[in-house]
Image (cartoon, helix red, strand yellow):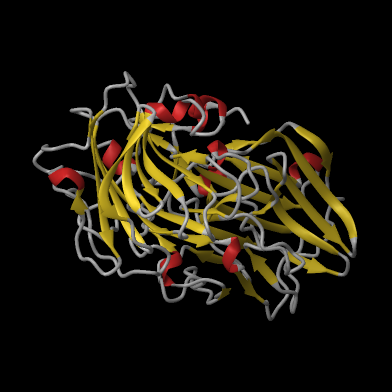
Amino acid sequence: MPVNKDFYTLAGSSGQSTGYTIDQSIRFNSDDSAYMHRTPSSTGNRKTFTSSFWVKLGKVNTNTTLPTPQVTHGVGSSGLQLTTDGTLTAYTYYSGSWSGFLKTNRSFRDPTAWYHFVYIVDSTQSVASQRIRIYVNGIRESSFSTESYLAQNQDTDWNLSGEKMWLGIDGSGSGYLADYLATDIYWLDGYAYGPEYFGEFDDYGIWIPKAYEGSFGTNGFHIDGRDASDLGDDESGNGNDFTTSGMAAHDQMIDTPLNNFCTMNSAAKHTDSGFTISNGNLDLTRTAGNNKGVVSTIGLTSGKWYWEVRTIHGTSYNIEHGVIGEDAGYILTGTDVSTGSRSSGYSLQFNTGDYYKYHGGSNSDTGINAASPSFQAFALDMDNNKVWFGYAADGDSSITWFESGDPAGGLNAIYDLDDGSDTYYACHNSSRGNGTQQARFNFGQDGSFAGEESASQTDSNGEGNFFFAPPSGFLAICTKNLQA
């Protein structure tokens, strides 16, 4: 599919002011059937409530249940969802019948950025259009393809004693939908508060979080995942904790609205059904098909950058990781990385037993065995237009750089970047091999590789979470470092 370059974050494209901080988010991975649930012991306000949360999307153009409390009562459910066309729907039921439904004309399909959603229900309002309100990044949604509202003072099926609330799953309790990261999840019982209670525009006109300082009501809660061992802990003081399922400590991430990390770009992934992306857009899995790729969300124009990959592959395979310039056809059209545009990239291949380096339509064998599982590392110097490739076997404590490379010293780069591009993206391409192939990327947000390893390394700025130590001066790809 064609890819809009607005879906790519460029170095220096955003800024934040100081103040309220969020240090973590929670990963909801559909492959792990991840969700949270709580059953209220008392009925709260069924006419008035507010939901506020930040989300970074994983899959796009698929049904995505957002982390408002979903409920099911009778034959109906209530909640907030993105649908397969990217539009946002808000729906409420009362006794098994629709009592309010909004569907936006606008689509939300950007996996590179954090969205802030505020959903307000207040049936006590005399004006019908005030009874359900949706705000995205501080701005009210006002254009709908479907628009109906609750009757004045009508109850909803939300907030009932004994009626389970779900987060990260649809109201049926069975639909483990698309992957995303979420943080600062608020639900206010009995209050209809707008986005100004949860966020503000910074000096650059960007919507950022701020501390909520109001009341929560009986069943209100605030979940932000600050305790990795108890991701559903309620920080409101109400003790309305949620029980987690399919989640572990490694699902606490340092990717937040105030420090947005690079991932692989699900809006720029080939649509082949045998090539999937999951786990916060860090896991790439190949089960069928050939030469299908994806590029990263953040384009790099200057500075020095480091990332690492953990790879599992079969005995017959051709997987490659590396960098690709902005002029490559894949970035603009969503076509195969390997068809024409691949020659514009610089990559490290696993090619039936050994590591190969590849550029300009030809490859050469390094003579080094590509074990499985194994690790690969990449150091990109955009100030001097150089790139280094490294590797480590499972159990190694450090990266070995090909061709005696020394990224920290600027010596023996495996390639000079000479194709004329001003911006480069991390990229991945793979062909079907014998068995399932998996590449798990880490741009600094999860050096545990989803719990497979124990990570403790940071970059030279003290940012990121890596399994291996980045070369001195090379940084995690995140907005704090882009703005440094």
Q: Is residue 305 visible?
A: yes
Vertical order, 412 against 187 (above or below): above
Residue positioned 47% across, 72% down in the render: 248
Vertical order, 344 against 305 (above or below): above
Q: Position of residue 329 (x, y in %)?
A: 49, 24
Q: Position of residue 41 (x, y in %)?
A: 68, 81
Q: Is residue 123 visible?
A: no
Which corner quadrant of the image does residue 292 belong to?
top right
The C terminus, quarter of image: top left
Q: Position of residue 123 (x, y in %)?
A: 78, 52
Residue positioned 38% across, 64% down in the render: 373
Vertical order, 96 against 83 (above or below): below
Vertical order, 439 against 322 (above or below): below
Q: Is residue 95 left or right of residue 81?
A: right
**Foreground pick, 255 / 367:** 367
Q: Position of residue 448 (x, y in %)?
A: 35, 65
Q: Is residue 17 left or right of residue 237?
A: left
Residue at the limit of the structure toward the top, as seen here:
420
Residue positioned 67% across, 35% down in the render: 107
